Image (cartoon, helix red, strand yellow):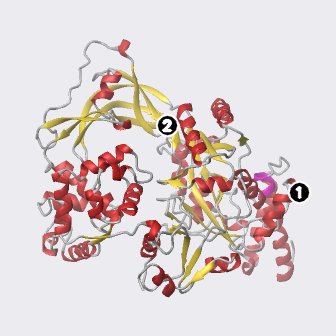
Amino acid sequence: MGSLTLAEAKARVQKLRREIDDLRYRYHVLADPAVTDEVYSSLTLELRSLEERFPALVTSDSPTQRVGGTALEKFGQVVHQVPMLSLNDAFSEDEVAAWGERITKLLPGKTVQYMCELKFDGLATSLVYEAGRLRHGATRGDGRIGEDITANLKTIRAVPMRLNLELVHAETFDPELVSRVRRALRNVTRIEVRGEALMSKAAFARLNRAQEKARNGAFANPRNAAAGALRQLDPRVTASRQLDWYAYSLVTDLGQRTHEEEHLICALLGFQVHRQTRVVPGLDGARAFHQEIAVARERLPFEVDGVVVQVNETAAFRQLGVVGKAPRGAVAYKFAARRATTVVQDIIVQVGRTGTLTPVAVLAPVNVGGVTVTRSTLHNVDEIERLGLKIGDTVVVQRAGDVIPQIVEVLSRLRRGNERTFRMPSTCPNCGAKVERRAIAGGTAAGTRFGCTNRGCSTQRLRQLRHVTSKGAFDIEGLGPKVLDKLVGAGVIASAADVFRMKSGDVAALPGLGEKSAANLIAAIASRRTVSLPRFIYSLGILHVGEQTAVDLAGHFGTLAKLRAATLEEIDAVPNIGHVVAASVQKFFRDRRNLRLVEGLLDAGVTVEAQQRRHAGALAGLTVVVTGTLERFTRQQAKDAIRAAGGTPSESVSTTTGMVVAGTKAGSKLTRAKLLGVRVIDEREFARLVGAA
């Protein structure tokens, strides 16, 4: 380039970046065959050379900054403003039909269209852009908090470093949609898009060849390889793995009216979306799409494990809401599981948290869909009898949904005559106590189960303690499985109540702990003596009661006393609670041994906070967003207060937001609330509304 002034270099750099961004867009969005890696690489090389000569011109969103020069020490955390939900699975036409019937009942009189798309077998990730520039990228994590893997996601060329906010190439899109997006972009500074990070089959083959050449272990499948690549602390290693990325969800409201438009807007902004989608008027079309993709599956350049079927209309999808941790309006229609044959070498028995004995098949190691399987749960003796299974049998194993190993068939014609019949033990394999036969009636839980009669069985006790102290329950920091094992083994604790009676001296004497660790643990326990009603209900380990069901029960009854005294009919009347769950809850609180668990915790100083019924509060029916720092409430306390007052807490401001609570240092959410005309209140007014003034 010869001698350049700073001004000349700046002009050239800006042109190069625009051209490189345009080439990336044409390649990944428009699938332009004229775009070659050689041209892209040549322009990028010139840009890097100029930036090295003029370091002041380097910006974080430059195409040259995709791969950082230094490794991270650890991954940070990112809080998802809108939870990253998972999808419920369907494995048959009947299950899809049942899902469709529920949708029809919940949307009476509405003609429902569905959008079908590929369900990539990769890792769900979130990308957040501020003023068009990539701010951070994160994993799903637990749905609320993910890991910050921005540096690794930047190495993927399909991920835009900055968005096409100017809407270049808009001529290929519907003008009315483009007009809507332009209007929306005037009032939006933060844009979030979600998609799948994955490794192509070709990249996976290259990686494993390199692994074998270096005499390292081969990866089992592309998904594992992609996960390993994104977990690298050195982005240069991630870059070498050649990952890809496809957008499938637009979180930010940019005027989209359908899920199909979400895909189109993502493409308009510069994201790669897969074109093999279809909008269908009914589930027959979804089944046809599923069959077509199943046939074409092996020819696709990457792994897919099913198709996603989603209610296309955005308003209807939102109206359907969420059940548990999955949206009602979408389902993952999985492909038939991949199968292999192996031999059942033994059947062992595991003792669960509630004392239930579960038979587990020990298998000769077999690779099923890229994963080595050595064990498979048999659920109960009814399942063994249904299969006609004996120890020593050759069996067909599948990974349901390509994940959970299960035995689906016994190849009895391959028997040699030395196979053995399995019988449930008459005594607990852990403590030696008598085992009783338990008939379970109703629903999918129907069948025969066996359980240990010794409530003091150490395996049951330890698993119950792990559950009580887990994140969804009392969430006691520092009291993980290893520490619990030591405390139980040393006889320091024998029940959940003992956890809250421990003294520092009881802990300090144990190997590997000491006075400081003991003091920290006792302080952590003390900070959890007061617990919300949903957490307390979940901590009890009631059969069929997960975190969301605990929230539903707490919101309906309000106090522990009312729940304990409730009849079966009263529990069965709770929204989202079925008869099997209701019977399990009612039975739990009629069992004297369970009541000793409850009373023991209360006697040990645990305080259970009452919860107001949702519809009775000042925020009834309102979606409320808290932004900034509050003095009197932690973020979790504010959410609990909103729920107690009848409202629904949310992390993002939209046209459906009813109120925004603004603390100190409130940022973009407050700005957006004002633009949308959403009511904004301060912490003092919030405290008054929720009865905490």
Residue 46 lies, with reference to residue 242, above or below; the image says below
Classify residue 374 by image quadrant: top left
Name the disc covering residue 370, or none. Answer: 2
Q: Residues within 10 Å of mark 1 (few under 14, many from 20)?
A: few
x and y percentages locating residue 665 in the rendered image: 56, 85
Q: Quadrant of residue 624?
A: bottom right
Per the model, the C-alpha gap separating discs 2 and 1 is 44 Å
Give coordinates of residue 613: x percent, y percent: 41, 66
Pick whichever of labels 2 and 1 is earlier in the sequence.
1
Q: State the residue in front, 354 or 294.
A: 354
Of 415 and 13, the residue lying toward us: 415
- Please state if 623 lies on the left or on the right of 10 as rendered: left
Q: Is residue 194 magenta?
A: no
Position of residue 127 relative to residue 438, above or below, is: below
Q: Is residue 554 above or below residue 403?
A: below
Identify the residue shown where x is 11% and y is 38%: 434
**Is residue 7 found left or right of 203 in the rendered image?**
right
Question: What amino acid is at disc 1?
Answer: Glu
Mark 2: which secondary structure? loop
Q: Is residue 255 left or right of residue 441?
A: right
Label placed on residue 171? 1
User: Which quarter shows the N terminus?
Assistant: bottom right
- Dominant SS in magenta: helix
Determine if residue 370 is in view: yes
Q: Which residues are magenta?
A: 24-29
Disc 2 residue type?
Answer: Gly
Residue 292 image position (x, y, % from top left): 68, 31
Residue at left 60%, top 56%?
319
Left or right side of 407 for 195:
right
Determine the image quadrant of residue 658.
Answer: bottom right
Residue that appears at 49% across and 82% down: 686
